[in-house]
Amino acid sequence: MKNSQLINRAIINALGVLVYVYLVSLIMTNGDKIFGTTDHKPFAPIAFLLLFVLSALITGGLVLGKPILLFLDGLKKEGVKLLIYTGASLLVLVLIMFSILIYLK
């Protein structure tokens, strides 16, 4: 893969993580509106932990899936580069989010 293809893939992966995190945050911030209040207290932590595990699976797949496949296919440099580019893209998104939060303060 060319560097430009790796960078584009990394940006798409990072944006996928951003969209997923946004959707989960919507569910978490509007949980009372969506699910209402309940007296079944043991189920809330179970649901949260299951969502946490599912989130790890989804974001892990987005961040690590293609780099691992490239690495196992013998394209070790490309796999490592894609992982680094994805991490850098996520860092840029984190910095943008923090900048927005600081600006809105």
Image (spheres, rainbow, N blue to C red):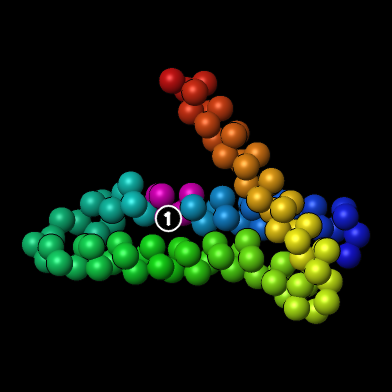
The N terminus is located in which quarter? bottom right
Q: Is residue 11 above or below residue 63?
A: above
Q: Main secondary structure of the magenta part?
A: helix
Q: Give percent across and percent down for residue 75.
A: 84, 71
- In depth, the one of 54 and 32 nearer the eye is 54
* Numbered marks: total: 1
Q: Is residue 25 magenta?
A: yes
The C terminus is located in which quarter? top left
Type of the residue with mark 1: Val
Name the residue at the bottom extreme.
73
- How many other residues sit within 10 Å of disc 1, few (<14), some (14-19) or many (≥20)? some
At a point 65% along the width and 70% down the height, the residue shown is: 65
At a point 54% along the width and 35% down the height, the residue shown is: 97
Q: Is residue 47 left or right of residue 104?
A: left
- In depth, the one of 34 and 20 nearer the eye is 20
Q: Which residue is denoted by mark 1 in the rendering?
A: 24
Name the residue at the left extreme.
39
Q: Which residues are magenta?
A: 22-26
Residue 92, picture quadrant: top right
Q: Give percent across and percent down for residue 43.
A: 19, 68
